[in-house]
Image (cartoon, helix red, strand yellow):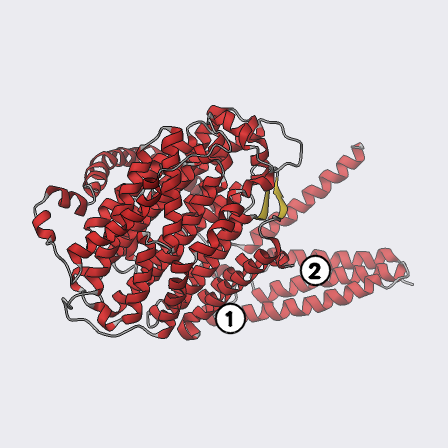
Amino acid sequence: MYADYAYLIVGLPVLAFVLTIFFGWHLPRGGGFLTVLATFAGFIISAGIFMENFPEKVVHQSMHWFATLNVGILIDPLALVMLLMVTFVVTLIHTYALGYMNGDPGMARYFAEAGLFTAAMLGLVYSDNLLQLFIFWELVGLCSYLLIGFWYRKPSAAAAAKKAFLTTRVGDVLFLAGIVLLYNNMAALNLPDGTYLLQFPVIYENLAKIEPTQLTYIALLLLGGAVGKSGQFPLHVWLPDAMEGPTTVSAMIHAATMVTAGVYLVARMFPLFYAAPHGLLAVAYVGGFTAIFAASMGLAAFDIKRVLAFSTVSQLGFMMLGLGTGAVVGSFAVGVGMFHLIGHSFFKALLFLCAGSVIHAVNTNDMREMGGVGKYMKYTAYTMLAGGLALAGFPLTTGFYSKDEILVTAWEYGVLGHQWLPYIFAITAALMTAFYTFRLWFVAFTGEARSDYHKHESGWIMLIPLMILAVFALFFGLPAQEPFYEAVGNNFEHYGVNFEELAVIGGHHVEHGAEVHEPFIIKILPILVGLGGILLALLFYSPWRRLDIRKFVGERDPFRNLLLKGYYQHEIFTAWFAETVVYGIAIIMNIIDIKIVDGALNKISELTLSTAGTVRKVQTGVIQNYITALILGVVVLVVVIKLAMEVGL
Amino acid sequence: MIPLELVIMLSSAMFGIGLWGLATRRNGIKLMMCVELLLNSANINLVAFSAYQPNLNGQVFALFSIALAAAEAGIGLAILITLYRLYGTIDLDNINALRW
């Protein structure tokens, strides 16, 4: 019954967007409560669908669009967990924003754009075909651009918005190319009339018929799209800069939901990646490398939001790695990657909202100027501690279960697939994660105040979402993990995907049912690195510190500066590549544009103008002339018709 | 009954006078009067045909046409008054601000 209202999950936020953008100015708090209610209604509907269908049934509604394309809704367990997570987390973030954005002159605009974002993200999740997914994908990117540049009068925010838009655009072009290539290959199969070529069930069904090399190209192009959206190396550069937007935007778009779209895409197209030779290998390596690369930059950053942004990039790498291990563990990898995605969105949204709460009070992002905030903001400090524990993988928290599973499957990937690098990357990144998370917490919340700031706690409207998220960050993992792996890991059984057949195409040697015995050390290593990282942070940064960080890493330490400068990416990408190579090409293009393209255009317009100048003399403006011409015309016409009739034509 | 030919000749004559007036006059009011002549010649035709081929369609049409003509005259005169206020004349030859 709830499935009949599935379209409202997108429809209501769109309605909220329209209402707030036109009438938000006249409503209290920019009409934000409309956006909150619309999102919450989406959550209720999703929960209803969950109760009725999970995990046995799939809701599929489809309408003809044109030619071999359709529009439709597909809610299988994979989409359903995303729907629930997005509506739940975004409802809380919108509620928090009611307090956080209060008093901002652009509040109505904020809630309108946030509503549009919500609609686009939810549409992306339950699209039943790749083209519709792409449309929502672009909409989500647009909302990200609008919200990063929310304070558009600030030059750095405008620049960051532009950077995010252009960088993700690189990925989007690859994604579109992948869709076109897939469409061509599907069309070449001569499927019966009336088959929608880009519909997911149809793709899953016909994968095995496509040529393997083509599959690899498609998989790599789609991965390009995912890399752009999910901030994976080398297209991760936009995500830390995206922190220029309001903190609620960072929490909503650049931590909990939108950036997971890339991971979701890989999960959604998992059979294709599985069937494509080297498809999952690329996913695993991109993910593993990004995990350690971003985590290392998080070690040195001082901006509280940038630390969290690097952490997000790194955790997205973990998710990609989790999916990539599918080469040895099969579709179970979807469950592994997606579980980390869901858990991560709870605690990363929590961490960002706490950071927002602190920034709201302290009015700076630099954690060197904070210190001792915990004394004045008890609730924020403890909820942030909960988020930090989950992120660091402290035993029994949500993050522990999800990350532990990824590390273990990555180890199996090493044993069975003989690819050890991803595991080494991941375990090191896990250590770094625990370290920088608690470095952040200790520096900001403990010790003495290092600057003069407003010492007050945030209002209840901001604290309640924090508490709800904290509960989920701590306690979601244990009860949810088994049914989650079961339902999402077997998601593709609903479509009858034959993974044994695809494994042959993809060249995976999976021995199903082969148990890998994990040594004891592998089992407890995730716990050890998590606790070890926390301990290191405790020794270096807490009020009870025993070691002085300056003795180990000096101000002039080259490695520290390398990390602080983000591996000189800005210098390489922007200063050198963009300003010499790209700018040079741009100059040549500009000359061609002015001389040839514009030149031709100008000639044409000149010709048009001179012709018109001659011909316009006919328009005398004297009505009598027109009427005379009219009468003459009628007379001639009558005579011609009469003559023609006489002749007998 | 008056023969149909005579009625048609009358209406044709009115139509011709109207056209001639439109083509030769410059005064806005006169032009409007000529347009009225054209409309009414058509009305005569409608009524005549309606009478000779006994049904009421033609007369109903004529009524519509008269209502329309009234509206047209109202708007036309309003435009002419505005033009007169602006230019101090209703000689259409002098009203050429939008001409090349």
* Identity, as a three-letter code, of the amino acid under mark 2: Leu
Secondary structure at numbered mark 1: helix
Please tell me which residue lies in front, A19 or A622: A19
Element type at mark 2: helix
Marked residue chain, label 1: B
On screen, residue A290 versus residue A1, left or right, reads left
Q: Which residue lies furthest to the front in this view?
A: A520
Residue in front for this viewpoint, B74 or B18: B74
Residue carrying label 1: B82
Q: Is residue A34 left or right of residue B13?
A: left
Q: Return the x and y of residue A501 as percentages of the image width and height.
A: 55, 28
Few, some or many C-alpha atoms within 10 Å of disc 2 (few <14, some 14-19, many ≥20)?
many
Q: Mark 1 or mark 2: which is in front?
A: 1
Residue B31, horizontal then vertical, whole percent: 61, 62
Spot occupied by residue B81 in the image (x, y as percentages of width and height): 53, 72
Q: Which of marks 1 and 2 is nearer the N terminus?
A: 2
Quadrant of the snapshot with the C terminus of chain A: top right
Distance, label 1 to label 2, CA atoms, is 24 Å
| Residue A547 placement (x, y as % from top left) | 11, 54
Q: In which quarter of the image is residue A117?
A: bottom left
- Residue A603, visible in the rendered structure: no
Q: Do the residues labelled 1 and 2 touch (CB within 8 Å)?
A: no
Q: Above or below — where is A29 with respect to A320? A: below
Q: Please name the residue shown 58% across and 40% down the image.
A: A493
The crowding category of the residue bearing disc 1, from other C-alpha atoms within 10 Å (few below 14, some 14 to 19, many at least 20), is few
Asked if residue A184 is positioned above or below residue A443 in the image, the reply reads above
What is the count of numbered marks?
2
Rendered residue at 56%/45% (across/down) = A128
Task: Report whether mark 1 lies on the same chain as mark 2.
Answer: yes
Q: Residue under circle 2? A: B38
Which subunit holds the residue at mark 2?
Answer: B
